[in-house]
Amino acid sequence: MSAEEELYSLLVPLVEERLIVPRACVAEVVRYTSPVQRDGNQNWMLGSIGWNGRDLPVVTFEGAIGKDVPAPTGRTRVVVFNSSTGRIRSGFFGVLTQGFPQLVRVNQEVLQLESKDAWPPGAPVLCRVKMINEFPLIPNLERLEEMIAAESIPT
């Protein structure tokens, strides 16, 4: 198998799930600090933190898909994603994680579609995949950016 057929990806740990995303989507993983909250935001929109001279909007993926918002722990980190839609002025957004992401290489042989259903309408999930003995979610990062932009946090 050639290197062109493999994709370096990250398994991002959540409370009960894992996300799998291309490594190129992630700018950095930073220590958790309490976000500055704005009144009127959805519970999944935690607020913003200072990052590299920018206000970085921080969300919980669990909350964005209609699950309970996790409480921060000693293992909590923020994965900083590159924005791809241009809707977030800072060019980046953060997602709360429960630990450090794990680097993995994926290809057609180890990744199979598991399911596309069971998500609330508008949820930022493309599908669930089977990857050897893991069942991570593939997030719809463009949809998540739309949701963040709709909350109109100044970024």
Image (tube, grey):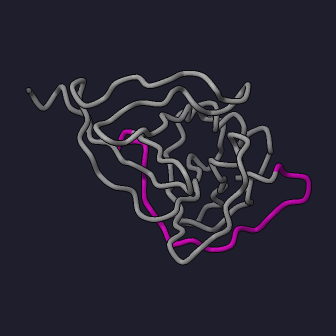
Residue 61 point in image, percent of width and height? 62, 47
Q: Does 45 appear above or below 48?
A: above
85 vs 21, nearest the viewer: 21
Task: Name the quarter where the N terminus is drawn.
Answer: top left
Q: Is residue 92 left or right of residue 112?
A: right
Question: In the rendered image, which quarter is residue 108 located in?
Answer: top left
Q: Does 4 appear above or below 30?
A: above
Residue occupying the point 80% across, 64% down: 37
52 vs 75, nearest the viewer: 75
Q: How many marks?
A: 0
Q: Is residue 79 left or right of residue 33?
A: left
Residue occupying the point 42% across, 49% down: 26
For residue 89: magenta? no
Residue 43 point in image, percent of width and height? 80, 53
Instruction: Write the start and end of the magenta stretch as one range.
Output: 22-42
Residue positioned most to the left? 1
Residue occupying the point 58% across, 54% down: 94
Q: Does 101 appear above or below 108?
A: below
Residue positioned most to the bottom? 74
Q: Is residue 47 left or right of residue 72?
A: right
Question: In the rendered image, which quarter is residue 25 located in?
Answer: top left
For residue 35: magenta? yes
Residue 22 point in image, percent of width and height? 37, 39
Residue positioned most to the front? 133
Residue 122 point in image, percent of width and height? 72, 27
Q: Does 24 appear above or below 14?
A: above
Residue occupying the point 70% across, 61% down: 48
